[in-house]
Image (cartoon, coloured by chain):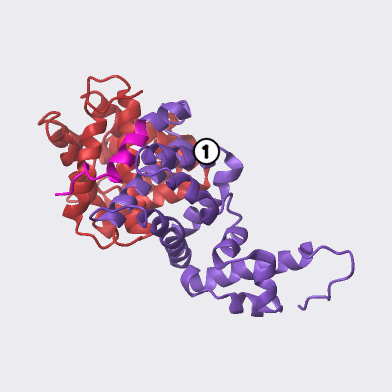
Chain colours: A purple, B red
């Protein structure tokens, strides 16, 4: 499949070409995982020039966000959550997490990734690499703590586990609890993991 | 399918009949969920007398454990974890949880249930009812706290989420961390949820 020359008056983000590139990216990530996937590989699959992939979709992370239909770009959303510093970080992270998961349409792509990861090792690798590069590494960079990756992953585990029990398994009273109560319950734990005072043995 | 009369010298727990009853139980639970499944329904599917279902497999909970191939019976395992009281409960619960999940063969049935729950509402209902009746209700009965069910579910979410990230998605360093370090990281959080001092807003 090749890309037609731009016709006058046609916007750069031609829907057809973008769709083809996004589909190619999805295949490339599924086959090679997040780390090993390349813009060049995506371009080859789509039958377009690598520059065009960049042009339509941006960075590798942005391409992934488009390919997986994620409801936010970590590179854009996280700085806002992180910027005010450690004070209240647990609550901001928890609130941001649930703001996404409370909306069925926005949590769907994460559920889909998790579902695939539970069945296919390749999908697990893709999710793992993306979570580590795009999310955890960014937050870890803001923390000056021993075992910060481990603590971050424990905090992430807390959030993901609550999401599973609330939105998928739907145990009560968690499933019907007001989201503010859930945030009040979980934010101190997340804060503890991200702070010096939550000591490890 | 009917059951043959016991022949002399043949043990009561005839493998064939037991297998038939277990398969029937699996179908009954899958179709009706944990709460609505009945011994009578299982017996009917297996073409045996309800008394025989009890005889081979015991209580409804024990039948579920056999049907789902679970690596422990909550009714037998939990009292030991709970008996010593609130002091150290977080660590005992956490340690028990990881003693099961560290063994690939023992975690497999839980993963299978979780996987099904992520795809089928009926499987989610079955898992939800079992978790609430067999696990959470038993632990909640030992706690004298406001919001104890919600706190318990937050603690359960912590454990399940860590298990997902460690054993399924396998993010590092969590996936390779010594299990004792993981217990040290998580047990205080579980203890906090089960204690008065972890306040809710």
Count of numbered circles on the image: 1
- Name the residue at 39% across, 59% down: A137
Q: Residue at x 20, y 55 (%)?
A: B179
Magenta residues, start to end: A185-201
Q: Left or right: A199 with respect to A58? A: left
Give the image location of residue B11, x and y in percent.
Answer: 19, 49
Q: Residue furthest right?
A: A8
- On the image, numbered disc 1 is attached to which residue? A99
Report the residue that reaches farthest toward the left: B84
Q: Position of residue A34 (x, y in %)?
A: 49, 68
Chain letter for mark 1: A
Q: In the depicted view, which residue is nearer to us: B159 or B109?
A: B159
In this rendering, the answer to whether A64 lies above or below B194 is below
Badge 1, how many Cα within 10 Å: few under 14, some, many 20+?
A: few
Q: Is residue B31 magenta?
A: no
Residue B137, picture quadrant:
top left
């Amino acid at each position: 499949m090749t890309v037609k020359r731009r016709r006058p008056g046609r916007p750069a983000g031609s829907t057809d070409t973008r769709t083809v590139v996004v589909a190619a990216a999805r295949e490339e990530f599924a086959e090679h995982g997040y780390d090993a996937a390349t813009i060049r590989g995506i371009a080859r699959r789509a039958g377009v020039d690598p520059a065009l992939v960049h042009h339509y979709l941006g960075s590798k992370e942005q391409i992934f966000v488009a390919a997986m239909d994620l409801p936010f770009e970590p590179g854009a959303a996280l700085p806002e959550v992180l910027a005010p510093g450690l004070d209240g970080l647990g609550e901001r992270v928890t609130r941001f997490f649930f703001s996404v998961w409370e909306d069925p349409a926005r949590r769907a792509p994460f559920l889909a990734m998790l579902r695939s990861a539970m069945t296919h090792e390749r999908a697990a690798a893709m999710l793992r690499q993306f979570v580590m590069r795009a999310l955890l590494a960014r937050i870890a960079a803001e923390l000056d703590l021993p075992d910060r990756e481990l603590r971050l992953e424990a905090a992430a585990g807390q959030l993901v586990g609550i999401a599973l029990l609330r939105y998928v398994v739907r145990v009560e009273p968690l499933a019907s609890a007001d989201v503010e109560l859930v945030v009040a319950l979980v934010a101190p734990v997340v804060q503890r993991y991200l702070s010096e005072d939550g000591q490890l043995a």
